[in-house]
């Protein structure tokens, strides 16, 4: 089947339909979350073929290749199988309410690398088109790592979230002038101060037990937050800069 033109955005969409899809639950009345992934495989063909293989039971609505080619796999009104066990802003089963975009990149396992300009340009135009069709709160533009921090790392610390935010896709913090120099929380600390930071993370959207213990789960969430919002430091430590960024993002949403 030849590509069809999305003329309003001057993009070429290549159909690549997959059987890995089903109906969204009848109680779902809106699509309000956009989840970005990297493919994490050696090639685009490997990723596309896996998303078409019914044995694997995985898919996404869209896939953006490194040269900017956009593949359409699942109609947006249908449910794609991309999020898995997930949580964001008080909601589980993110497949029900979300659109998933796979971005071709070998990922951390096979030689993680920056995302090329042609790919980012196409992705931005695709996201703009999706946002024109659906009401998506900027805070609901997330990575797979955000909604499944104990399992996933994508799209990772090389992904240009800041550029997306400049284009009106998602959120990004303003520079923080004076972070709290006394802040540095890590495993195995515990206490009220830990619970306070866990509460801030859950307020922003992450799934996390507010038990006052800085354990493995909290470390995974902090790491996911840093991959998205503090990419120069991805170590799972709640240091002064990370904490200041989190406070800023929460204040900006109030």
Image: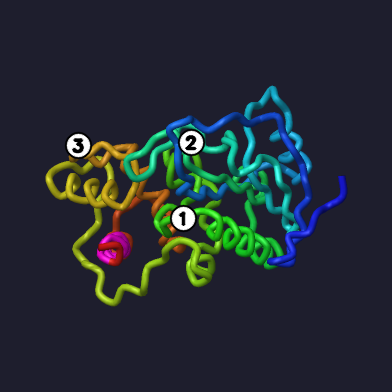
Q: Quadrant of residue 56?
A: top right
**In the rendering, at what x and y percent does residue 252 appear?**
29, 66
Q: Is residue 161 left or right of residue 88?
A: right
117 or 82, nearer to the observer? 82
- Is residue 146 in view? yes
The crowding category of the residue bearing disc 3, from other C-alpha atoms within 10 Å (few below 14, some 14 to 19, many at least 20), is: some
Q: Quadrant of residue 233?
A: bottom left
Quickly name the residue at label 2: 96
Q: CA distance from mark 3 to mark 1?
A: 34 Å
Q: Quadrant of the N terminus?
A: top right
Magenta stretch bounds: 244-251
Q: Mark on residue 135? A: 1
Label 3 or label 1, whichever comes before in sequence order? 1
Q: Residue furthest left?
A: 192
Quickly name the residue at label 3: 211
**In the rendering, at what x and y percent does residue 107 appear?**
62, 47
Cβ atoms under marks 3 and 1 closer than 8 Å: no
Label 2 or label 1, whichever comes before in sequence order? 2
Q: CA distance from mark 2 to mark 1?
A: 15 Å
Secondary structure found at label 2: helix
- Is residue 114 in view? no
Q: Is residue 128 left or right of residue 148?
A: right
Q: CA distance from mark 3 to mark 2?
A: 28 Å
Secondary structure found at label 3: loop
Q: Is residue 170 magenta?
A: no
Secondary structure found at label 1: loop
Q: Residue at x 63, y 64 (%)?
A: 125
Q: Main secondary structure of the magenta part?
A: helix
Q: Residue furthest top?
A: 55
Q: Residue furthest bottom?
A: 177
Q: Residue at x 45, y 37 (%)?
A: 28
Q: Mark on residue 215? A: none
């Amino acid at each position: 089947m030849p590509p069809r033109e999305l003329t309003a955005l001057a993009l070429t969409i290549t159909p690549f339909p997959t059987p890995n899809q089903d109906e969204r639950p009848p109680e779902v009345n809106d699509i309000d979350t956009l989840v970005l992934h990297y493919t994490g495989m050696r090639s685009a063909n490997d990723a596309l073929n896996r998303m078409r293989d019914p044995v694997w039971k995985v898919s996404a609505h869209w896939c953006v290749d490194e040269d900017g080619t956009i593949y359409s796999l699942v109609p947006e009104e249908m449910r794609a199988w991309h999020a898995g066990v997930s949580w964001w802003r008080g909601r589980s089963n993110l497949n029900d309410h979300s659109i998933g975009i796979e971005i071709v990149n070998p990922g951390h396992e096979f030689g993680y690398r920056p995302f090329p300009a042609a790919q980012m340009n196409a992705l931005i135009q695709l996201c703009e088109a999706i946002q024109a069709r659906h009401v998506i709160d900027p805070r609901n533009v997330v990575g797979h790592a955000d909604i499944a921090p104990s399992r996933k790392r994508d799209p990772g610390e090389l992904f240009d979230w800041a550029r997306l935010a400049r284009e009106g896709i998602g959120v990004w913090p303003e520079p923080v002038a004076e972070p709290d120099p006394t802040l540095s929380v890590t495993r195995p600390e515990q206490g009220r101060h830990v619970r306070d930071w866990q509460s801030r993370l859950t307020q922003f959207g992450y799934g996390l037990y507010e038990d006052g213990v800085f354990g493995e789960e909290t470390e995974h969430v902090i790491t996911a937050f840093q991959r998205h919002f503090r990419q120069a430091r991805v170590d799972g430590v709640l240091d002064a800069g990370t904490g200041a960024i989190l406070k800023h993002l929460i204040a900006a949403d109030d």
